[in-house]
Structure formats: structure tokens, C-alpha cells
Amino acid sequence: MTTQLLLVQTLNGLQFGVLLFLVAAGLTLVFGVMDFINLAHGVQYMLGAYFGASLAAWTGSFWAGLALALPAALACGLALEVLVFRHLYGRDHLSQVLATFGVILFLNQAVRALWGTAPLQMPMPEALSGGIALMPGLQYPVYRLAILGAGLGTAGLLWLLVERTRMGALVRAGASNAPMVAALGVDIRRLFMLVFGFGAMLAGFAGVMAAPILSVEPGMGDTVLILAFVVIVIGGIGSIRGAFLAALLVGLIETLGRSLMPDLMRLFMAPSPARQAGAAIASMLVYIAMAAILAVRPQGLFPVRAG
Amino acid sequence: MMAIGRRGVLAGTAGLLAMPAVRARAQQQGVKIGLVAVQTGPQAALGTQLRDGFLQGLKHLDGKLGGLTAQVVDIDDELRPEVAVTKVRAALERDRVDFVVGVVFSNILAAIMRPVTESNTFLISTNAGPSTFAGRGCNPFFFTTSYNNDQVHSVMGQAAQDEGYKRVFVMVPNYQAGRDAVAGFKSRFKGEVVDEVYVPLTQLDFSAELAKIAAARPDALFTFMPGGLGVNLVRQYRQAGLANIPFLSTFTVDEATLPAQQDAALGFFSAAPWAPNMDNDRNRRFVRDFEAAHAYVPGSYAAQSYDGAMLLDSAIRKLGGNLGNKDALREAIRAADFQSVRGNFRSAPTTTRSRISGSARWRSAPTANSRPRRCARCWRTISIPTPPNAGCADAAQA
């Protein structure tokens, strides 16, 4: 493996990582601040992609699609909060898991009924559709670099928002002790709703960004959701900083593992079984890493809650 | 076992052992079919194709199979083997289905094989055909209207060989059908396989693999990425500027994926046992009526399921609707006395090792329009003999 290839793979890993971060950021806030397990978060990602693809097709422009999809995703998140999730905050985690799982089934089915089961496609914006030759024979799509940039930018903005604003202070306080914040006279309900809508919009944003490179299809959020949960568990529940670092870590482990593992295994085994075993182990690596990190730091890398 | 030129043969597994008498069932008016098709998740489009194809067959038969009113029990396997087993068991025990039909993915078929066949119910696969159930692992209650997995891929192996490619990069999902694809391809391609990459069946982003392909600089890529996997791969392959490396594929660029791939698939090759433009009356009628009823072009999943309905119709008709005698039923299924959308249909040889020459088509993807199709003229037929291990004969000999 050449250095060049390794660099490209690292870039791939980071790009996948920031995409994961956009999904995980909302999830970790909702879980951390509201102590609410929202399995339906992946559905928000799917809805974002569907809104983006349909609106882009309707308006004929990627940018218009993106601009319209964000408020649509926000509206969907708020509607879900008011209709379903609000009634579950007081319940135990099992009820939340069951109810939000129901929302997944319902919305996946609704998407199928509305758009059909066949995958949709969303065209890339013209300005970003080129490629840069990072290594011979490979045009690294500019769009992927744009995802990386957008993800990092969003992460920076989130950091400012959470660390440097009054709203952010409330969110952090809510994450560490919600009843105390409520006792201090803050309208925790409104805060919850804002956090929830914002998280849904971030997931929708990730969906729109991913739509031109991944196929837009029912259930596309489910795979992402599992990895997003891994990210927030590794990062420490409720911590944006933790989610960011964990997302990059998971992205890198996933991508580099996939490309390096089969070659590593070839040192010990015959080529053919090495490739299959390598592939199998590569897909476990993220979970092995999670187990290892939890063994050392049961609260995740950056625990928010005291005690 | 596979399409032969314009003809097709039924992939059959047939027992030489007489089966014990089966649970007696009261003479009934209808016939119940458990239709297993993935309906949730990223691969739902393939399951929908399969299901719509079977239902189109029923529609052409006025809702009857061999004179019996057919009732279809929908089983969504969710592409999860454990879910498939639970639901199929329920269909067998609670709904008392007479046949289990369908199955897109080989890992699902492998999971439900025992529960279905051990209850002495016939399992008709209309897509998945894992090599492990041909020859030694064959089962007298299992038939398929599609192929033995290896066969379609070996066509692409032959094509790569004919084109004179020396170094080919191989990438498949890490499950039985993926391993069959590699075996099938290698059985005909004699050049160097630069690298074999196995990806999870849930892979979304191929960026890591694409960088590897670019680094290896092969003469061609051979891949098998059904459904949503193929949509992602094809688009990312083109985005990465790799389209100058010939893209040889099976089940990756087809009617199920083209609507989402559009122009990205232009000039990419695919091998298939069937195509919508196959020139016979039965096929023309199937494709015309299917497109009129659904908003999409049928793929091989639909065509093979349509054949599945026709096969059951012919078998039940032969027995006059009496499904009690399983041995007679098996013989009737094996006779495959119906017109396939692939032309004449025959069962694979059961008692001899005679070789049947088969073929699949090698073709490139078309230009995009509102309903993208594969190019109508750019195909050629490649004949591949049926592997000697197909059918149940070898099991008896082994």
C-alpha cells in the first residue's frame, strides 16, 4: 500500500466520519439533554435525503433543493416531537424504544407508499461535480471534499453555539442535570423542542449531503443509525465534542479497516480465506473498538453527566 | 438449469428416493402460496420486482393456478435470515401454505431451506440459486426457475476471457452468492485476478474500494452488487473517474437499478439470463402488460417469478388440482410443461450427467430516458455448459 493510497483512504475515512457526525450530533443532544432514546433519528436522515432529491428534481437545482429540504426536515422533526415524542419524555427507556421503533416502521412504509421502493437519485451540483487527481487514475470527487468542508463547518458552528451562547449553556446544563435547569425557571419544554428540531434538521442536512453519492431509498437511515449510536456511546452521551471525535474515529476505523484488514490477514493466512476473513473482521472492527473504549472508559471518551 | 439461447431449463433438484407419504390434507378448493420477498430496507425494490412479477403471472392466469383459486400470503423477509425463518414457519404452520415461492437473496434461501423442505412443502426459488444446494446439497423439495448462482457470473468470466483482459479486479458482497460469483467468474476467466475484495452486504460507500481499484489499475472490474449496492457503486465509480476501466457486472446494472443510476451506467456491461427485449410472444406479452400495470420496467427478478407462477400452474394442472401426492407433484414440477418468458423450459437432467449448453446475455447499459432500459441491440449471447454438479443426480451418485 502506497502512502498516496493511505492518504486517500484517510480522507475517505474523515469524509465518512463528518457525515456520521452530522447524524450523531442531533442524536447525542436528544439523548443527552432529554434522556430520550430516539431510534427514529435515522428516519430523519432518510427524510432529508428524500426531501432533497424530490425538491431538487422539482426546482431543477441542487441548491434550491438543499435550501428547501432543511426547513422541511425541521418541520418534520417538530411535527414528530409535538405528535409523538413529547408524550414519551416521562416514560421509561423501553417505552421510548418501542414507540420510536414504531415511528421507523411507519415512516419507512410511508416513504415507500409516497415515493415507491426503487431508489431515487439526486444530481450533484454542477459547480462541485468535478474531480481532483489525488493519485494516478483516481479522480477524487470535489463533492466529497465539499461534504468534508460542510461537516467541519457545521461542527465549528455547533461548537460555537453550544460553548459560547446562552442557549448552548442551557443545553449543556440540561445535559448534565435537566431537573435542576427546570427548577431554575427555564422552559425546559421549549428547550427540548428546539433541540429536537435542530437535531432533526442536522440529520436531514446529512441526508441531503449524502444523497448525490448514495442512493436514496427506504430504510437508508437504519444502517446509519446503528453507527450513529456507536458514535455517541464512544463519544460520551450528550457531548458534541465527544460525538465529533468519535465520529471521525469510527469513520477512520471503518474505512481504513476495510482497506487494510484483508492485506493484514494475508500475513497469516492463504490469500483467499484471508480476504474473506479480513472483510469479516473489518466489519466488526468498529464494534470491537467500541467494546475496548467502554472497557477503559465506561462513560465514553467525554462524559457529560457527573457521577 | 439456466437459459439456453432462447430456451430455458428449469433448475431442478430431484430425488431418486421415494419420499414417504406426506401429511394428508383435505381436498381443498384453493391453493395457498407463501411469497417470500424482501419488502423493507434498501433492497426492497428487488423484492417488489419479484412480487409484482409473480402477481402479474397470476393475473394472466385469472388468479388461478392449475384451476385452483390462488391465495398469496405475503412474507417480507426483511433481508434478515432469522426474521425469514420465523415468518416462513408461521406461514407453514398457521396459514398452511401449499408452496413457498420467491426469495431474492441466497442467505435468506439458505435460512428457510430446512424449515420449508422438512415440512415436505415445495420451495420454488424464483431468484436465489446458491451453489450449495446444487449437486451434493440438493433437496427433492427444492426447485428454481432462475439459475445456479455460478452460471450467470461464469458468462461474464467468459466475456472477460474473450475480450482478452489480463488483469481483473473482483469485488463482491461477503456472503454465499458473492462467493458463488467469484467462483463462477473464475471458472471461465483464466487471466490474473489482481485482487478480490469482499464488502458487507450493507455497504453504502465504496470510496475505500474505489481507491484500491485505482491503485491496482486493472484491465477491467468484475462485480456483483445487486440492487441499492449497485446504485451506489455505479454512481461512485463514475464520480471517481474510473469509468475508463471496463465495468463488467452481474445483477448490478439492470432494470431494478437503472432508474436510479441513469447516465452513470452508460457503457457499463452486465450479464443476465433474461432481458425484457427477448424475442418471443410470451415475453412480449409479459413485458407489455407488466409495464402497463406498474410504473417501471420489469427485471429478471420479475421475469423469473412470472415463470414461477406459470410453473406452478402447469404442475397443478397436470395433477388436476390434487396436491396430496408429493411424488406426483414433484414429477409434475420437474416436467416444467409451460412456455417461459425465456422460451422453452426444461428441467436440468436428473439421472444423467449430460451437459446442456446454456447461455446468458452480455450487454451494456443504455442511454437514460424516463424509463431507462438496457441497450436493445448491444448484446451477444454466450453459451456456457451447465456445471456437472447441477441437479440431484450427483447426490445419488456421491
Image (cartoon, rainbow, N blue to C red):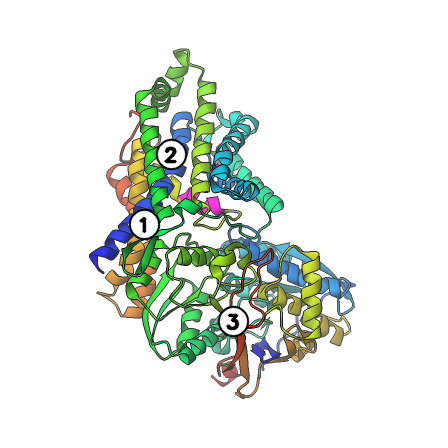
In the image: residue B101, left or right of residue B206: right
Q: Is residue B81 above or below residue B129?
A: above
The front one of A281 and B142 is A281
Quickly name the residue at label 2: A25
The residues bearing labels 2 and 3 have C-alpha atoms spaced at a distance of 45 Å
Q: Earlier in the sequence, mark 1 or mark 2?
A: 1
Quickly name the residue at label 1: A12
Disc 3, SS? strand
Q: Which mark is residue B363?
A: 3
Residues behind callouts 1 and 2 on a single chain: yes
Three-letter amino acid code at the position of disc 1: Asn
In x, y percent, where is residue A29?
Answer: 39, 29
In the image: residue B40, left or right of residue A307: right
Disc 1, SS? helix
Q: Is residue B194 above or below residue A303?
A: below
User: Circle 3 marks a residue in which chain?
Assistant: B
